[in-house]
Amino acid sequence: MKTKLTQVTLAFLSTTSLMMAGTGDFAQSIAPKNTSLRDLAADRPDSTESPITVDKGHWQIESSVVSVAKNSSGGVDTETWTWGETNIKYGVSDNIDLQLIFAPYILEKVKVGGVETRTEDASDVTLRMKWNMWGNDGGKTSLALFPYVKIPTKTAFSNSRWEGGLIVPFAIDLNDKWSLGLQAELAYVYDEVDSDYDLDLLHTAVLGYSVNDRVGVYVEYLGIMNSDSNPYESYASGGITYAIHDQLQWDVGVVYGINDAAEDSNVFTGFTVKY
């Protein structure tokens, strides 16, 4: 199973890398060229958010063009395709931006005993506010407070419950090439098993390396602790970013579950652009 997942991942990464290289000249010609903006700081592709906000009066679009998640547990095989999940951001002040996250199309295929069922629908809507405490316009470190709320849309993938939480991302530039990001998140989520709300603690650490002015790579660890009796989940991830322009970036990445409680894998590609 792991070998098959690795082959799929390598094929996905190779295809996306060729696409990134082939579309570079075209994207360069249409990309925004506002040099007065801050350097592009995206919350994707890793799970560790950036503490840097979008410039006041400007928009930033972060979209996962497609992601493929797979999981096998207890004789149930699940494959989930998510298309166009997008985070739309707007800078309302020098240190605050507002965000809306929504996936317009999700396809889930569940196979049990050779019988497959398919579900297609949209996601819930998540509203977030990033409040940068320091480091927006210089310095080696930066930190932000990041409250959010999930609004149920009552689609096939909605649990019809309001949820929310607080994210606290911290970043430090170790030198000209290396950077470190740390994050803690408290999430108030509904547990359908015991029909009650739980408090999850998510923690991440990501190490990034700038290969050159255009290419960056990262490796990351993600852990999820639950206030109930659910087992601890641990994940490892990695990916590549390619700066087509100062305000336009493409990315590709993969997440692998380390222990049995975690989902098996998720492979994705997307982009970030600021205007």
Image: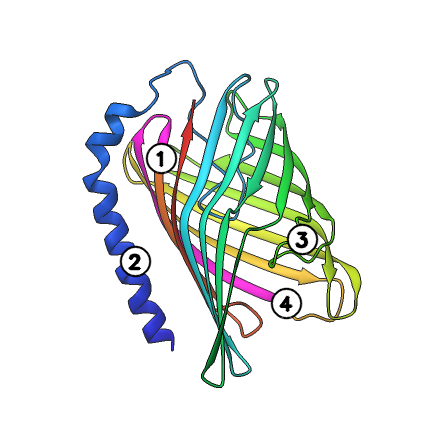
Q: Which mark is residue 63?
A: none
Q: Which residues are magenta?
A: 233-248
Q: Position of residue 138 (x, y in %)?
A: 50, 21
Determine the CA span between mark 2 and mark 1: 18 Å
Q: What's the residue type where badge 3 is placed?
A: Lys
Q: Residues within 10 Å of mark 4 (few under 14, many from 20)?
A: few
The outermost residue toward the right is 196
Of the two numbered discs 3 and 1 on the same chain, state the one appearing first in sequence: 3
Residue that carries the numbered disc 1 in the rendered image? 249
Q: Residue at x 56, y 33 (%)?
A: 51
Looking at the rendered image, the quarter that the N terminus falls into is bottom left
Of the two numbered discs 4 and 3 on the same chain, state the one appearing first in sequence: 3
Label 2 secondary element: helix
Label 4 secondary element: loop
Residue that carries the numbered disc 3 in the rendered image? 154
> Which of the two discs, 3 and 1, sits closer to the camera?
3
Q: What's the residue type where badge 4 is placed?
A: Tyr
Q: Residues within 10 Å of mark 3 (few under 14, many from 20)?
A: few
Asked whether the beta carbons under mark 3 and mark 1 sit within 8 Å of each other, the answer is no
Looking at the picture, tell me which residue is in the foreground, 174 or 259.
259
Determine the image quadrant of residue 11. bottom left
Q: What's the residue type where badge 1 is placed?
A: Gln
Determine the CA span between mark 3 and mark 1: 33 Å
Label 1 secondary element: strand
Determine the image quadrant of residue 158. bottom right
> Which of the two discs, 2 and 4, sits closer to the camera?
2
Of the two numbered discs 2 and 4 on the same chain, state the one appearing first in sequence: 2
Determine the CA span between mark 2 and mark 3: 32 Å
